[in-house]
Image: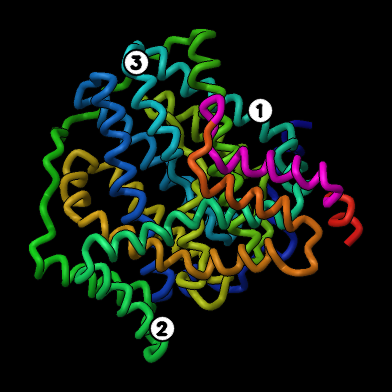
Amino acid sequence: MPGNKANTIFAPPTGASSGYSLREAFTIKSVSAGVVAALFGCSGPALIVISAAEAGHLSDGQTVAWLFAIYVLGGLISIGMALRYRQPICGAYSIPGAAIMIAALGGLDFREAVGAFIMSGALVLLLGLSGVIGKLMRWLPMPIVMAMIAGAMIRFGVGAVEAVGSVPLMAGLAALTYFLVMRFVKAVPPVLAAGLVGFAAALALGLLKPADVDIAFVMPAFTTPMFTLATFFAISVPLAALVIGAENAQATGVLMVEGYKPPVNAMTVVSGVGGMLAGLLGGHNANIAGPMTAICGSEQAGDDPRQRYGATLVNGVLFALFGVFAGVAVPFILALPRELILVIAGLAMIGVLLSALQQAFHKETGCQIGAFVALVVAMSKFSLFGISAPFWALVIGVAVSWLLGELRRERAA
């Protein structure tokens, strides 16, 4: 029966209860990690969405509706998944999906784009209900999944280094503070201390400059969808592949790295429903997000993994508030130096990257070459059919391991 199937999909994994009350999930570490994740998601990515809206010549009302859709729904996904599963499963939207819309909206009626957004969500929903994504994630060799995670997330570490090179005093002080606090002050979250010192340095150096973003505080203007076969293949299919092959796969892998048992099918279903609802409101996707899940699921969000879902709740509330007040909030969030966001996000990813690399290239793994190929593909800017590198990292990594007979050795191990 459909009801029984839905109950199965959304049933928490065995032993999913954290053992902590909701209040105990809000620690200084979980709150600070949730704030860092929200700042990351509300800064540069918001500017990408605004650029796509400008490329499509959208009105202020349509732009605000787009931001409202993806941030409010993304926040609600975070809150709902965290409360249901007691895991740091974050919702947001596809950043690469927003980037491809910059080119796609240039010569397209926005009504057709909205129809494509809804169809993309429906496609993801159907795949989630089928259970095929959960089976696929269980079949994929873990070393290749972990290598994909490391390759996809390594850009945050590289971005932190580049930020120090660009603004040595501000970003360098933040990084130095992080490591000193990690070594000598156990009671204070290193990422929180780094953020405060970096912000103070930015203020002292005069680097806080409100962004000149032309978005009025207006009511959202919703767009009537138009469904066409051309936009289904041009927009819906690539967006669905990005949501499943990049965002959901990254989030699932990150959670596995940290020892969780993520509800893969439920994450896919929620991403599909979020995509359809966001489309109805005029936004491109609201789905499970990889980078924010990585930040909230890392050791920076708490020493005990069972308490880290508090970071996702904080992130979800801030995301939703940003979506409601997007017209006012965007210029102030974008006033923060990009380099400060990059260095803090990179520092927060250290634990995830170390764990992923250790699990991908452990000497007993049977897929070392396939994992290495997955790593370098995920690190690259490779894209095919509008689908970005993380998806192809899994495909190519598995193909190489199969050709070399590594899959048999991995299964045997």
Q: Which residue is mark 3?
A: 110
Which residue was labeled with disc 2? 182
Q: Which residues are magenta?
A: 384-406
Amino acid type assigned to the residue bearing label 2 in the image: Met
**Label 3 or label 2, whichever comes before in sequence order:** 3
Q: Image point 58% across, 58% down: which residue? A: 254
**Viewer-proximal residue, 87 or 148?**
148
Q: Which badge, 3 or 1, comes first in the chain's sequence?
A: 3
The kind of residue on which mark 3 rests is: Phe
Residue 108 spot, x, y in % from top left: 36, 12
**Residue 287: image location, x then y, percent:** 50, 40
Q: For the stretch drawn in magenta, what is the main secondary structure?
A: helix
Q: How would you rate the neighbour count of disc 3 (Cα within 10 Å): few for under 14, some for 14-19, many for 20 or more? A: many
Label 1, on which residue? 126
| Amino acid type, residue under disc 1 in the picture | Leu
Q: Secondary structure at mark 2?
A: helix
Compared with 226, 199 (above or below) is: below
Closer to viewer: mark 3 or mark 2? 2
Q: Quadrant of residue 130?
A: top right
In magenta segment, residue 405: yes
